[in-house]
Image (tube, rainbow, N blue to C red):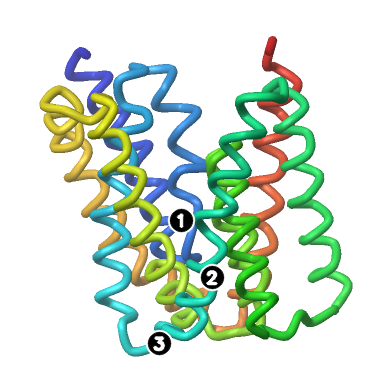
Amino acid sequence: MTPLEWLIAGVIVFAGAVLQGAVGFGLGMLAAPLLVLLDPLLVPGPLLSTALGLTILIAVRERRTIDFRGVGWALVGRVPGAVAGALVVAAVPLRQTHLVVGVMVFIAVGIVASGARVPRTRPALVGAGTLSGFMATTASIGGPAMAVLYQDSSGRRIRGTLSGFFLVGLLVSLSALAFVGRFGVPEMKASLFLCPGTLAGFLVSGRVARALDGGHTRTAVLVVSTLAGLSVLVQAFVSRS
């Protein structure tokens, strides 16, 4: 990649880091489709590595508000959801899979926007974790499923809890990529070039987060979730598979 392309990549991850640091998710949704156009090497390994570093920073910043009970039960469903997603990816055309995921996101957003509240019971948390694992595996957007369940919580609790949940998932994903030879020295070097933009985005996200915490967090969650659904539907319509 040329220096200009690395600069563009840095700007992309900066914007994604600001979004995730302020709302709790969104880095992959924003950055993945743009980075892959610059260089396919940047996705998934380097982007996931960048997301891991950002997730750790957010989790540390919001550590006092993490719902560890919720994270634990959601993780129970994460692995079965990821396995189901992998089976679907292997058996169903990508376009149809993306259409289903996009519709699922919009249904969830519609339920929340209507004013309905989903109690965070054990079954609901396991179900949200399962959906997150499924959606992350099939369409790289695992955030909305968990975010809508916590949409009536404070901004800090949403960011902290999602970061705790994502942390385990990212470690598993990177380990799997390393095992199959998709996260080696070239990907690690690429990750280092993305670090400055990620760190800068995290630092800026603190101010944005404080602004959203003034009563705008729920709206931000719904908006970003809607954008995630739209991005998946767009991928479905442009996909040839």
- Please name the residue that numbered disc 1 is placed on: 19
Residue visible at 36% across and 71% down? 207
Q: Left of 180 or right of it: where is 233?
A: right
Rounded to the nearest whole Å, what is the CA distance between mark 3 and mark 1? 19 Å
Q: Which quadrant does the N terminus fall into?
A: top left
Residue 74: numbered disc: 2
Percent of width and height locating residue 117? 79, 82
- Please name the residue that numbered disc 3 is placed on: 65
Q: Which quadrant does the C terminus fall into?
A: top right
**Amino acid marked by disc 2:** Ala
Q: Nearer the viewer, mark 3 or mark 1?
A: 3
Percent of width and height locating residue 185? 11, 26
Residue visible at 50% across and 40% down? 30
Rounded to the nearest whole Å, what is the CA distance between mark 1 and mark 2? 23 Å
**Amino acid marked by disc 3:** Thr
Q: Residues within 10 Å of mark 1 (few under 14, many from 20)?
A: many
Q: Of label 2 and label 3, which has the lower sequence position?
A: 3
Of all residues, the one furthest to the bottom in this rendering is 64
